[in-house]
Image (spheres, rainbow, N blue to C red):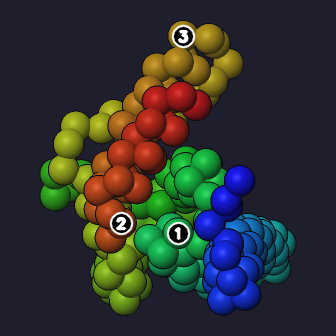
Amino acid sequence: MNYGIESVKDLVEFISYIITSLSLVGIGIAYALSKKQIHFSTMTKCINDYRELMKPRLKDKDLAEQYIDLVNEELFYFENNFVPIEVSIEWIDGMIDYLPFFKDGKFEKSKMLTILDNSEATKKMLHNYPRVMKVIKINNAINFEVIHQSISEEDNRKLRKAERDKLILQMISKLKIGFCTKQRFKCKIKKR
């Protein structure tokens, strides 16, 4: 039988192909591990920042400004794929209660950060964060009464989730992410 190895040169070439193949597999594994490490580090940082913010020591205005800054940072991480899609969706769902929105030119006040009202100070603060401003400008019909209602009854829960999912999709559509990533977001939202 002849395996194509007829000389030392052929043997060295065959060994180099094996080493190259193993190197490529190693690079792939290293990439996957480093990506997971980036995801973990980013999530840990954001979670710690959020916990620090929610300690009852800040004035409402300072809390609101620092929260908007954190949201801006998280949106940057979503756009650059530093956080898994599932986590991004859950964090955006949580943002809905804290962010104000502009819907059809009208201001929708934040549910949790009531200092974020229709005042000039709020508008000025938000304009310092163009990424956040882009995401909170909603152009489709979203029912904020349903989004912010209690989830004590099963019917309310389903209706609320459906409306929140619509808003999450609109917010994601405003981010600078690729078409394929947006489609993956849509699939994950439908399955949650």
State which tag comes first along the sequence, 3 or 1.
1
Q: Pick whichever, 18 or 7, lies toward us.
A: 7
Q: Position of residue 135 (x, y in %)?
A: 34, 64
Secondary element at tag 2: loop
* Residue 12 image label: none
Q: Residues within 10 Å of mark 2 (few under 14, many from 20)?
A: some
Quarter of the image for the C terminus: give it.
top right
When asked about the image quadrant of residue 44, the answer is bottom right
Q: Position of residue 55 (x, y in %)?
A: 83, 72
Q: Position of residue 8 (x, y in %)?
A: 73, 87
Which residue is denoted by mark 1 in the rendering? 81
Kind of residue sitting beneath label 1: Asn
Which residue is denoted by mark 2 in the rendering? 177
Q: In front of the other: label 3 or label 1?
A: 1
Instruction: Check the image and report above or below for 1 versus 140.
Output: below
**CA–CA distance between discs 2 and 1?**
9 Å
When asked about the image quadrant of residue 122, the answer is bottom left
**CA–CA distance between discs 3 and 2?**
33 Å
Secondary element at tag 3: helix
**Contact (CB < 8 A) between labels 2 and 1?**
yes
Q: Is residue 160 left or right of residue 41?
A: left
Residue occupying the point 44% across, 71% down? 79
Q: Pick whichever, 10 or 31, lies toward us.
A: 10
Which residue is denoted by mark 3 in the rendering? 155
Kind of residue sitting beneath label 3: Asp
Kind of residue sitting beneath label 2: Ile
